[in-house]
Amino acid sequence: MGCTSSMPNKMYNVGKKKNKKRKLNIPEVVVFVSSLSLPGETNLQRALRGLLPRHLVDRLSGLRSQIMILAEDTGGLAFNELQRALEEYLPVLIGLVNKEFSLDQTVDFKWKNLQDGRQEICIASSWFELLSVVNMMAILSMSEANSLLIPKDGLDVAERTVSEDCKKDAIDLLIKASGYLDFCVQCILVQMPPDIKAKLPTDLQEEFLGAVSFQVLGQGTEMQLGLAVENQKATLSVKRRLACEQLKYFAQAAAYFYHGLILDKGKEPSCHITAVCCFLAADELLTDSKKANLSFCVASPVTRALQALPDLPDFSLSLRADDYVLPEMDPAWNDEKWEAQLQTLKEHLNDSVDEPENE
């Protein structure tokens, strides 16, 4: 994988001139996590004035602001609190993508990525907002899994251990994250028109989301294999099957291996800097891997195969993503009184547009 061998708080000097070099901190990583995006300032009251009841607009705005403030204050590390806030926001947000209300392109939703200097992305699409929210839930699940697998004792990497319960909880979180990502690809992106899709950032494109979904399942299988290796009761056939499944997942997640290249495609200078750091870290890991491979190759063939290895058996994948389903739309959207008011307002707005033309 590479991630399992990453070093904690690795520092890299980036820049050509000595007096202009920047030191970047590459945090310890066990689970690959996409860069986190946070909601930006969006004036829902102005965009939805006259189209929705005041109390519903205030609720939408309040829930979104709660997510924004919580994420800003904690840097996205308050996993449980943020997940609850996002789950509370979703039922109210779903009304904006409901075709019955025709509000899909009413609001310019803004999001900012923590990795590229907080550059804002603004797209007038409620589907973009829904995609960003569900994707954020996936990233939080991956981040929480990563935190469970990094011991807090501060010991040397070789001496630290992670409990079996933490590993199992991390696997469950990865399966959940994969479910969120699959839902983004299969149920949200398909609703977007091509012009909106073209505006999406790299980490919300279909190919990237699909690759990360396969990759987190591969990492979950890798942890299952680790648990099987540590379990004396696990048979060799079980370990072999898990190893084969792991390779199959990684083969389908090619974008993971080219993460540095993906980052380097970003338009911001910080994307290029981060990509360089990824390449430097990958080069160090590759060097260590070559040393380990060389020591194995020169060893006496006691257990090493003397002849060419046979092709791996083609097992069906056993670890699958959770099936994620959106919650029910908030009951406030089904209030008959304001629905009649909304229809009247729409007719009034249409009449206002037609009047200048008639004159």
Image (tube, rainbow, N blue to C red):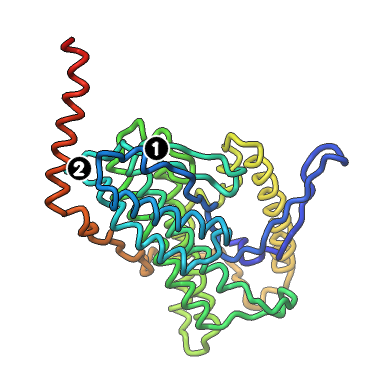
Tell me the quarter of the picture where residue 102 sits. Answer: top left
Residue placed under numbered mark 2 in the picture: 101
Pick whichever, 17 or 316, lies toward us.
Answer: 17
Left or right relative to 225: residue 130: left
Q: In the rendered image of this protein, does residue 309 appear above or below residue 36?
A: below
Residue placed under numbered mark 1 in the picture: 108
- Percent coordinates x, y for residue 57 in the rendering: 32, 48
Q: Secondary structure at mark 1?
A: loop
Q: Are marks 1 and 2 in contact (CB under 8 Å)?
A: no
Tag 1: Cα neighbours inside 10 Å, few (<14), some, or many (≥20)? some
Residue at 31 percent across and 52 percent down: it is 93
Tell me the quarter of the picture where residue 117 sits. Answer: top right
Pick whichever, 46 or 112, lies toward us.
Answer: 46
The reply to whether residue 229 is in sight is: yes
- Percent coordinates x, y for residue 28 in the rendering: 66, 64
Residue type of the residue flagged with mark 2: Phe
The quadrant of the image that shows the C terminus is top left
Pick whichever, 160 or 286, lies toward us.
Answer: 160
Residue type of the residue flagged with mark 1: Asp
Please state the total of marks drawn on the protein image: 2
Residue at 41 percent across and 36 percent down: it is 123
Residue at the far bottom: name it: 233
